[in-house]
Image (cartoon, rainbow, N blue to C red):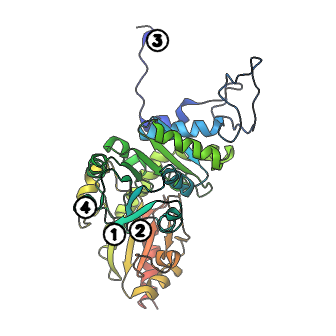
Amino acid sequence: MAPSDRKPARWSKRTLSAQAMGKTDPITGGIVPSIHIATTYLRDPDNQYSSGFVYGRPDNQTVREAEAVIAMWEEAEAALLFSSGMAAAIAVFMALKPGDHVLAPRVMYWALRNWLLTEAQQWGLHVELVDMGDLDVVKAAVKPGKTALVWIETPSNPLWSLTDIAALAEISHAAGARLAIDSTAATPVFTRPLALGADLVMHAATKALNGHSDVVAGALATAKQDAFWRKIVAHRKSFGAILGPFEAFLLIRGMRTLDLRVRAASATALDLAKRFQKHPDIADVLYPGLLSHPGHPIAASQMKGGFGHMLSIRVRGGEASAIATAAGVMLWKRATSLGGVESLIEHRASIEGDGSPCPTDLLRLSAGIEDPEDLFQDLDQALRRAHGSVG
């Protein structure tokens, strides 16, 4: 068979991501795609824009190339990048109509939770927080014809509880509502919400998608480009919640190693979770990959190949011991974020403040790609010092 007669190979997502969907510089042949920084584009002699590019706010080639990688990972019809994860999430809610009923989790990313309980209501949305892990509770809370959106986060931050995406999709669609998933912690390496029935998936691309703690970005991917999606597209254009071309370039660079980074970090998180279960100074370990985790059966059914890089530990001795432990690490970085190549530790309740459902003895851990033994030894010595067992 002649080379020209061969059918294109079905490359894996890992391969496509590593090569940025095969994009190269068309002028020089450079294997790294160019950064397109133009803010305006030439109009054709016939007054049209045959290039498809009009103005830099909605139109940028580097941004579109990054969106193509995300859409590929999520098996989506389209993807949009935003200036932050919050901008991406809020765009979904802003596409709703005043008076619409919304269901969201009781435990979720704190900044979005606050927005839903304050600003969203000023836009006329009726927000109800429920336990998304209890299907009977969700069924009782959903209002056919009135509930327009069910928003879930799985695994949820910072307790890493699980929600059955397929079951929630069935409940949501039966009531005429859309289902949107914050899949930041799971990443598209391990979970494909659209394939499980979700309508929209959101990522704080600042986190694992970028993976290097140097970009703030958000992403949405959609199962279909319907009227609701077009409203989100219009919202981004009107509100200017766009991502800059250099940030998009860095995001593409980060996603080239997404599969390797996420799998390595997930393996480390599982290793640490198992070892911390036996630690005398730790009261509980919250990680979906543990058989003891109440959400493990759901995680095993919808997270394929790993259980993520995020875990939390509850430290014996309460808040004071937890804060002392975080202060005593040398290798872990005491900072608020997740998904980077460096491992982070955070006393989450201090960040969330009053009204937080996060236990005060909890430390949230984001496993990076360092040597797992080094990470264990560092946190072990910090725990022992916090509990007075090191001289």
Residue 192 shows in this picture: no
Residue marked by disc 3:
3
Q: Nearer the viewer, mark 3 or mark 1?
A: 1
> Mark 4 highlights which residue?
140
Q: Residue at x 70, y 32 (%)?
A: 54
> Eyeballing the image, is 370 above or below 231?
below
Residues packed near mark 4 inside 10 Å, few (<14), some (14 to 19) or many (20 plus): few
Task: Please say if the residues under marks 3 and 1 sit with CB atoms less than 8 Å apart.
Answer: no
| Cβ atoms under marks 1 and 2 closer than 8 Å | yes
The structure residue drawn at horizontal position 40% and vertical position 81%, both measured from the top left corner, is: 361
| Disc 2 from disc 3: Cα separation | 52 Å
Q: Residue at x 38, y 65 (%)?
A: 128
- Local SS, label 4: helix
Q: Do the residues labelled 2 and 3 touch (CB within 8 Å)?
A: no
The residue under label 4 is which amino acid type? Ala
* Mark 3 surroundings within 10 Å by alpha-carbon count, few (fewer than 14), some (14 through 19), many (20 or more): few
Of the residues shown, which amino acid type is indicated by label 3?
A: Pro
Q: Mark 1 points at which residue?
A: 286
Q: How far apart are marks 4 and 3 (CA)?
A: 59 Å
What amino acid is labelled 2 in the image? Pro
Residue 81 visible in the current orientation: yes
Is residue 103 or residue 195 the one in the foreground?
Answer: 103
Q: Which numbered mark, 4 or 1, is in the foreground of this view?
A: 4
Label 4 and label 2: CA atoms lie apart by: 26 Å
Which of discs 4 and 2 lies nearer the camera? The answer is: 4
